[in-house]
Image (spheres, rainbow, N blue to C red):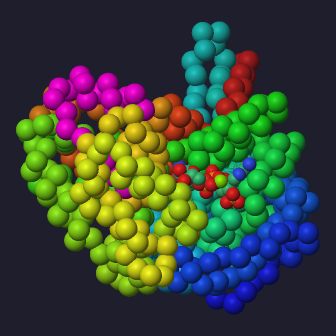
Amino acid sequence: MNSHPESVFINGKFHASPGGVVMELVNPATEKKFLEIRGASVSTAIEAIEGAHRAFEGGWRDLSPGKRTEILFNVAAKIREKKELLAALETENIGKPIADARDEIGLGAKIFEYYAGAVTRFFGQTIPVSKGGLDIALRQPMGVVTAIVPWNFPFPIACWKVAPALAAGNCVVLKPASLSPVTALMLGQLAVEAGLPPGVLQVVAGSGSELGDALVTHPLIRKISFTGSTEIGSRIMALAAPGLKRISLELGGKSPNIIFADANVMEAAQTSPMSVFANAGQDCCARSRVFVERAAYKKFVEAFVEATKLLRVGDPESDETQVGPLVSAKHRQTVEHFVQGARKGSGKVACGGDRPYLNGAYLSPMVVLEPSVEEPVWKEEVFGPVVCIRPFDTEEEMLREVNSSPYGLSGSIWTNDVKRALRVSRAVESGVLSVNSHSSVHVEAPFGGFKMSGIGRDLGMQALEGYSELKNIYFGT
Ligand code: NAP
Ligand code: MG
């Protein structure tokens, strides 16, 4: 891709943003520069917010639901039409394996289709109030919503904030992560080509620390939907407080993968490596703490390590690759800090933690056996291809350790005992669990965390609730 100096797509067009800082995008697989763009300045971000507000009052708010549905379906069709290009750009930008990139662009299209259909199925209520008359509780759009998204799943996360926000009748200012602005900017352009009125979706790439305050505190912003680190999420919550802005936050995780001896242990062991090493472990749902009932521990560990060694780590442009490089050499250094800690710690390294190639921000998937529960590699979010496995003796002891984490995003439970599956899934403090599976994200179901993993829910019909206000109207008759 050629250098595109413009990092904002606002009011229907790409714009230069004088005063913005130049960001150099490096392909992490080759460590070569592939694009340079100028980040949005604060004044450009404010222009985007004001333009979105004009688009809201100037027609989007009052557009018929049927027309909104039609436009959102058209956006989905445009995404499908450009799927190969979008996937290739994502791979070049952040080193995501091309097969995953294609799936994620397809997921983005599916999300737009779901919310296109949801527009006319997002019901209010009529309430038989005791006084008589007619009482209706009505869903209404909020106005301008800020969506701030991370670099690990840039396209689908942008879509799963933008699509429900637009479906509910809002306008959106989308800020992609500095490391991964390309597909978000293209989404802005494709949406306008698909018939979305200019200004309804504004895309401002640029530095979060520079633009964050304006995007959160500007008086025209009614809601901030954020996915990223717990640290920035809690900062956004504090910034949003004086203006009582609505927030939804999807933050970090340290998710458990729990295997009971009565489970199909081989299936669990063979599928579990990709539940943590997919996307090179840069996944808020990564099952990075594995708990195995002692009777199955040896068998599970052997099969898990064997399956891990078979993972195809390498060139993200190859269709065969399962694990690509980390997003940047700098992020690899952060992850290697945990790797070194684990090597010095009380656990045993079964495999991985090395740089497998001379070039590129690669790190081979690392399995750490039985580190102490006090060590950072066991307790903290690594956000890289590192997993820890420990045995447990009783369900109670295991649950105590699982729930001692400040996080509560996702997790897996493997057992063939139905009562135990129900009991344990109710006891684990996480927003998203899977039983005999590792599947966390379903367009139709709510997604989000307990505790320090966040507030509010993305996806499903629940996301629409988070992008609307509820108004009660009583009619005397
Ligand atoms: P981050 O700083 O939370 O970045 C996420 C988004 O927030 C990016 O768009 C970022 O913009 C923006 N941002 C940064 N500072 C901001 C501020 N002061 N106000 C408003 N927005 C701001 O995450 P990161 O630095 O990329 O990664 C750090 C760690 O966060 C990771 O190692 C991982 O543990 C966790 N993380 C979790 C998720 C998740 O899916 N839950 C995703 C990514 C990261 P810039 O890119 O311009 O800074
Ligand atoms: Mg950061």
Quadrant of the image occupied by residue 69: bottom right
Residue furthest to the front in view is 344
Q: Quadrant of the N terminus?
A: bottom right
Q: Residue at x 76, y 53 (%)?
A: 209
Answer left or right for 239 relative to 168: right
- Residue 426 versus residue 461: which sits nearer the camera? 426
Q: Is residue 299 above or below residue 199?
A: above
Q: Residue at x 70, y 45 (%)?
A: 224
- Residue 358 versus residue 169: which sits nearer the camera? 358
Q: Residue 246, position in %: x, y? A: 70, 36
Q: Residue 99, position in %: x, y? A: 39, 76
Q: Is residue 230 magenta?
A: no
Instruction: Please say whether residue 263 is visible from this viewpoint.
Output: no
Q: Is residue 395 magenta?
A: yes
Answer left or right for 434 relative to 210: left
Q: Residue at x 37, y 49 (%)?
A: 344
Q: Quadrant of the C terminus?
A: top right
Residue furthest to the bottom in view is 2
- The span picked out in magenta is 386-405
Q: Is residue 318 above or below residue 158?
A: below
Answer left or right for 355 relative to 311: right
Instruction: Please say whether residue 188 is visible from this viewpoint.
Output: yes
- Residue 89 versus residue 397: which sits nearer the camera? 397
Total number of numbered discs in the rendering: 0
Q: Residue 214, position in %: x, y? A: 84, 49
Quadrant of the image occupied by residue 136: top right
Q: Residue at x 61, y 73 (%)?
A: 183
Answer left or right for 210 relative to 166: right
Q: Residue 468, position in %: x, y? A: 66, 40
Q: Is residue 200 above or below residue 90?
A: above
Quadrant of the image occupied by residue 473: top right
